[in-house]
């Protein structure tokens, strides 16, 4: 883990955005109880979807927030409950490919290609 633990980092990001736990719940759909447990390091290993939701509303990249978790989720095989559907991924800001931000048009094209690809069986 990095110098600052995940909970402290999460709390600092929320406060920097002047958000209460309730406001962050309203934005992310994560309960205030769960958010509080994350901030107080009473719950660890947030799912991919949780990290995406938080990063979207706290103004940091997914990779940045992931780097603060105490599990090396990026290099592990996700379990079924941690799978992130690609359609969900396309809903989030800051989608990049090889470090380049994708435009909305590029994201729509990828979505179309994936839909066609999944029809081929």
Image: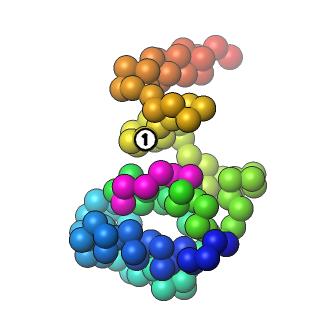
Which quadrant of the structure image shows residue 57? bottom left
Residue 116 lies left or right of residue 13; in this view the side is right
Residue occupying the point 42% across, 60% down: 54
Which quadrant of the structure image shows residue 12? bottom left
Q: Is residue 46 magenta?
A: no
Which quadrant of the structure image shows residue 79? bottom right
Q: Check the picture and name the quadrant holding the N terminus.
A: bottom right
Q: Residue most toward the right?
A: 76
Q: Check the picture and name the quadrant holding the C terminus.
A: top right
Q: Position of residue 84 (x, y in %)?
A: 56, 46
> Residue beneath label 1, please?
94
What sort of colour scheme is used for the picture?
rainbow
Q: Position of residue 14 (x, y in %)?
A: 34, 70
For residue 30, say whether it is visible: yes
Residue occupying the point 68% across, 58% down: 73
Q: Residue most toward the front?
A: 3
Bounds of the magenta segment: 58-63
Callout 1 secondary element: loop
Residue 7 lies left or right of residue 35; in this view the side is right
Mark 1 crowd level (few <14, some 14–19, many ≥20, 10 Å Cα): some
The tally of labels here is 1
Q: Position of residue 87 (x, y in %)?
A: 47, 35
For residue 31, say whether it is visible: no
* Viewer-proximal residue among 2 and 50: 2
Q: Position of residue 47 (x, y in %)?
A: 56, 60
Residue occupying the point 36% across, 60% down: 58
């Amino acid at each position: 883990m990095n110098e600052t633990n995940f909970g402290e980092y999460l709390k600092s990001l929320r406060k920097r955005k002047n958000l209460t736990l309730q406001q962050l719940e309203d934005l992310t759909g994560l309960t205030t109880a769960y958010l509080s447990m994350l901030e107080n390091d009473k719950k660890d290993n947030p799912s991919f979807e949780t990290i995406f939701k938080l990063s979207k509303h706290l103004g940091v990249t997914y990779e940045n927030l992931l780097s603060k978790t105490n599990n090396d989720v990026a290099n592990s095989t996700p379990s079924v409950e941690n799978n992130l559907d690609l359609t969900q991924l396309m809903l989030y800001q800051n989608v990049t490919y090889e470090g380049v931000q994708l435009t909305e048009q590029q994201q729509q094209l990828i979505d179309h290609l994936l839909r066609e690809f999944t029809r081929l069986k």
